[in-house]
Amino acid sequence: MPIYEFRCLKCQELFEFLAVRSDDTMETQCPHCGAEDFERVMSSSNFAMGSGSGSGDSGVSKQTRTCSGGNCTTYEIPGP
């Protein structure tokens, strides 16, 4: 069951929506102001890549740079 994150276009409040089935229609509104206009935003993840067992090299590389909101990090993860 995916959880989608949205930003209200009226008050900028962030809120989540749980999709129980893939054919669910989204009839929801902002829990803060009641508006029905919102946009889906990219959610942050708490997924961590560790070295684990095996070869020791996970193949993950990262690049950190300064962005308008502070520091931004981009992760390159191997795979298709």
Image (cartoon, rainbow, N blue to C red):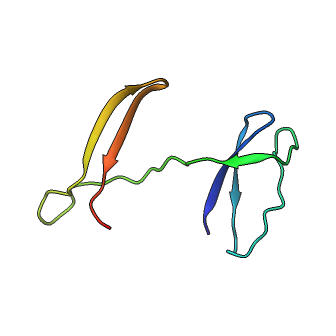
Compared to 60, does 27 lie above or below? below
Residue at 33 percent across and 29 percent down: it is 65
Say left or right for 6 vs 28: left
Residue at 75 percent across and 72 percent down: it is 24
* Location of residue 44 in the rendering, given as x and y in whole percent from the top left corner: 51, 46
* Location of residue 51 in the rendering, given as x and y in whole percent from the top left corner: 20, 56
Q: Which residue lies furthest to the left in this view?
A: 55
Residue at 32 percent across and 67 percent down: it is 80
The quarter of the rendered structure image containing the N terminus is bottom right
Residue at 72 percent across and 76 percent down: it is 23
Compared to 36, does 32 lie above or below? above
Say left or right for 53 vs 16: left
Looking at the image, how many numbered discs can be counted on the residues? 0
Residue 66 lies in quadrant: top left
* Location of residue 47 in the rendering, given as x and y in whole percent from the top left corner: 41, 54
In terms of depth relative to the viewer, which is nearer, 27 or 47?
27
In terms of depth relative to the viewer, which is nearer, 36 or 57?
36
Compared to 12, does 58 lie above or below? below
Residue 21 lies in quadrant: bottom right
Residue 70 lies in quadrant: top left
Q: Which residue lies furthest to the right in this view?
A: 34
Say left or right for 47 vs 27: left
Compared to 8, does 52 lie above or below? below
Say left or right for 61 vs 6: left
